[in-house]
Amino acid sequence: MAGVFTLEHDGSRMRLLAFDGRMGASGDMLLGALVAAGADPSVLSPVEDALDVTYRVHEVDKNGILATKVDVLLAEADGGDPRGEGHADDHRHQPETEDGDDDEHGEGDGDDEGGVDAGHSHQHQYRRHDHARGESAHSHDHDHAHSHDHDHDDPTHAEGHGPHRTYPEVVDLVESMDVPAGVVADATAIFRVLGEAEAEVHGTALDATHFHEVGADDAIADVVGVCLLLNDLGVDRVVTGPVAVGGGEAEMSHGTYPVPAPAVVNIAAAADWSVRGGPIEAELLTPTGAAILAHLAEGVETLPSMSVESSGYGAGGWDFSDHPNVLRAVVGDGGSRLVRDEISVLETNLDDATPEVLGGLQETLKDAGARDVTIVPTTMKKSRPGHLVKVVVKPEDAERVAYRLAVETGTLGIREHGAGHRWTARREFETATLDVDGDDYEVSVKVGSDADGVVYDRSAEYDDALAVANETGLPVREVMRRAVDAVASDDAD
């Protein structure tokens, strides 16, 4: 899922964007971080043209760090409750911060929210792109208690404004916007991630699942806005370190739930990056933030080697005494044409494993977290035939995979070579459609490319090809050849 987005680049070098999510992520924090890192907020105007919202940009102080905050406001707030008659502003949990402010991680409700006095914030008013809003823990399919009163003389935040749309309705709205095709593809993919996570939580079908707040105007402004800003930056690869989820509990309409929220757990399970608890007892990673990163970002343990061109901080709404509530974005030249992947290597020698056990190790060890498993015939002491098993793992998965290797094989010792790295290609999967005697068959093809997007390998998935071969009578290698040729032809077009 991660790291496959639809930006175009000139292939001259790899432009890298790295997020530091040690204080979590939300829609507003991502917007702010991208603008602070150099994206032009004027590209957000198509969202304002399509929705009854406007972006506001202002700078706030977060524990001594100047950060950019993006608010999504109702375009017209001329007295009364502009969100419509009978709108109950009770859909968000508003936990009390350490400073006593009832403001949320991703969403402040006024210029001086989050413990930043309005007189000390550096506001830049843009008519169409005042970028600085916060997206909060409310942005998922749950209603939260919220007792914050709005001053109708102040700009009104757009949280919850607009209809609670289904996934198809959100897709239709995004496709109607005057934005690049790649932005549409990324935004709709992000909403699909959100929709599938919510559908799994509630046991509903994707097309029938209402997004509630996530399908409201402000959340759509967050998702499409992030995709527009990312497109403006022109990056080729997005990475993130482990993302903090916070801790404690959150009050939702269905009861009290532990942090992270159920939808966030579902999204993180399918993402390429890892999560970690803390460092604050609050909801730091929102479903919208998680879904955006799940679609866009590859997981890394440390900041990759890069020549830094720009950086910036996106502000969340809460203030904490010991932790600046910001999301950092760093943009620069990523240098290497291949992806550096931190790994450890496990090894053991076996002289009594049965063929059945050896044959099942690929599946059982990968289920435990192994990235690759190699079994090599070898000669052991007293000239006995045996096997060397080598397993590539992420360092954090090493103990779990080693234990699974031990119990599966009965080995009494496993060597670990320690944390190192490997260089890997960027890998994407494309679907080839083959016409055989008037019937269409689909075969998945893995496409390997360098960091500049230059494709140097295509290989058809054997299981898919075998299924087509069995049904059509064609040789497997002929099915694989046709699938690769089909994908290559599509890419050339």
Image (cartoon, rainbow, N blue to C red):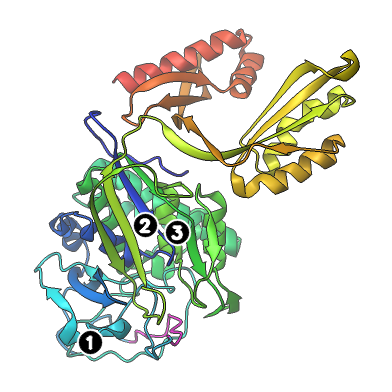
Q: Which residue is mark 3?
A: 290
Left/right placement of residue 206 relative to residue 61 reads: right
Q: Is residue 445 visible?
A: yes
Separation (CA) of disc 2 from disc 1: 39 Å
Residue at (55% x, 74% y) in the render: 247
Note whether residue 220 is visible: no
Where are the magenta residues, as a range?
86-97
In front: mark 3 or mark 1?
Answer: 1
Asked if residue 298 lies left or right of residue 471, the reply is left
- Number of other residues with Cα within 10 Å of mark 2, as a class: few under 14, some 14 to 19, many 20 or more: some
Mark 2 / mark 1, whichever is N-terminal: 1
Viewer-side label of 2, 1: 1
In this picture, residue 158 sits left or right of residue 411 = left
The three-letter amino acid code for the residue at tag 1 is: Asp
Q: In the image shown, does 344 or 127 lie closer to the viewer?
A: 344
Instruction: Identify the mark at residue 117; answer none if there is no mark.
Output: 1
In the image, residue 41 above or below residue 272: below
Where residue 493 appears, x then y in whole percent?
Answer: 28, 20
Q: Earlier in the sequence, mark 3 or mark 1?
A: 1
Q: Quadrant of residue 105?
A: bottom left
Residue at 69% x, 29% y is 390
